[in-house]
Image (tube, rainbow, N blue to C red):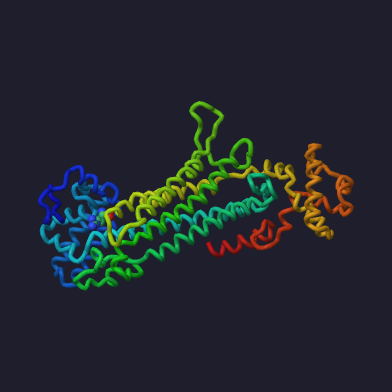
Amino acid sequence: MKNRSWGGRFKNSQTTEFLKYSASIHFDYLLAPFDIAQNIAYAAALQKAKILNGTEYKKITKALRKIDTEIADGTFDYRIEDEDIHMNIERALNQKIGSLSGKIHTGRSRNDQVATVTRMYMLENCKSIIEMLRKLRKTSLKQAEKYLNHLMPGYTHLQAAQPVRIAHWFLAYQQMFARDEKRFVDLLDAADVMPLGAGALAGNNFGIERKFLAKKLGFKRITENSIDAVSDRDFALDFCYAASVLFTHISRLSEELVIFSTGEFNAVSLPDELCTGSSIMPQKKNPDLPELLRGKTGRLNGNLINLLTMLKGLPLAYNKDMQEDKPPLFDSCEQTVASLPLVIKLLGETKFNTKHLRSKINRGFLTAVDIADYLVLKKMPFRQAHHIVGKIVAECEKKEKTFSHLTLSDFKKHSKLFEKDVFSYADPALSPDRKKGVGMTSETSILAEIRKLKKRL
Ligand code: ARG
């Protein structure tokens, strides 16, 4: 079968295998509502350019609206032989209004058309992701308020390091998600540029009013070089990168929750509704959601590398390779949109086992730095203080003791500078409030941070 839209110069038809192979309708059908909006706006621009008269414009847009309804209610007839969504819609238009449909593609190419509607798809997803990231940030903030006065060990090298407020941990993720939100907000602005009117690559011969078109389609700006307009997929790269960084953060959160929820750590309990049981081991509560989120990060990174590799070395302007931009872009969009509500629930409903954590911070020498700093306040050089506290820790370990078991004379054996007030420095409960600077773990620092965020969110 010859392709009706461009079959004129061909003697032989494409093979069925090749037509199937080169079709994109099985994934670009997602662009349908955007392509309809684009067609309706373009019809108005064609009327302004005197290519369509008023009656023709009305006929075309009425038929397009009908097609839009068919798409929305699931009755639209997608056909693989029409290759992609743009040609499917044009064929449907032809079925409704006959040869008049042939005027809609005047001065336009699928190259500027697809670049435009793929952006529209991405921008819409970007907006809902930004909304969800706001919710996620609010959720971390709420949890921070709830756990303001509870402590947990902070880790480095996954070794218990220093006591921190659980609120501080939640606010760390808040910061990460705030940067993610900014990445999507910046992308939303950078990608808000309309390629339509660029034609195949050189522009169009009809004086199509591009600013008018952009306004109709809700774009802020129009592209400034028609070759670049149809070649540029930076918006898709930027989206996939932003999604990958977001998932990198989500995967770190997930990893922590997987570890914290083990019997060995016993630091958190995850909501039952987001966990699964084992088909054989009745005692199990498996953290499937954070595991899945952690696993999906690989998939999103794959999408980014996929796009980068597809675009590398492509000559200007459009090449069919670029049809392959959609599966990775769509997948990163869909996965992000589907994951965020679950991440919000996971972060918002995870309960910290505060009682167990309290007992935990009393073990493990988490105030070693505080004791060294105590000696520093008594004028000892920090390196010397570090050495002395190291010796105290070694001795405690040998005798299976913690700092709280030590008497003043135990301390004094190591340095004459130790006095009774060392006990307050050895007490993990008192350690966080000594760290009073911006972004630190004292109650005042955290309250200031919460206050600032409440104003912003
Ligand atoms: N389905 C194509 C894509 O997604 C549309 C553009 C086709 N352009 C062309 N010159 N064959 O890239």
309 lies left or right of 26: right
Q: For the image shown, how many numbered marks are present on the structure?
A: 0
State the residue at coordinates (15%, 68%). 52
44 lies left or right of 305: left
> In the picture, residue 115 is in which quadrant?
bottom left
State the residue at coordinates (61%, 54%). 145
Query: Whereabouts is ligand 1, in terms of quadrant?
Result: bottom left
Q: Tell me if residue 212 comes above or below residue 234 in the rendering.
A: below
| Percent coordinates x, y for residue 409 in the rendering | 89, 46
The residue lying furthest to the top in this view is 280
> In the picture, residue 109 is in which quadrant?
bottom left
| Percent coordinates x, y for residue 248 in the rendering | 50, 50
Q: Nearer the viewer, residue 101 or 274?
A: 101
165 lies left or right of 221: right
| Percent coordinates x, y for residue 179 in the rendering | 52, 59
State the residue at coordinates (17%, 66%). 57
| Percent coordinates x, y for residue 126 in the rendering | 41, 58
Residue 262 appears anywhere in the view: yes
Residue 217 appears anywhere in the view: no
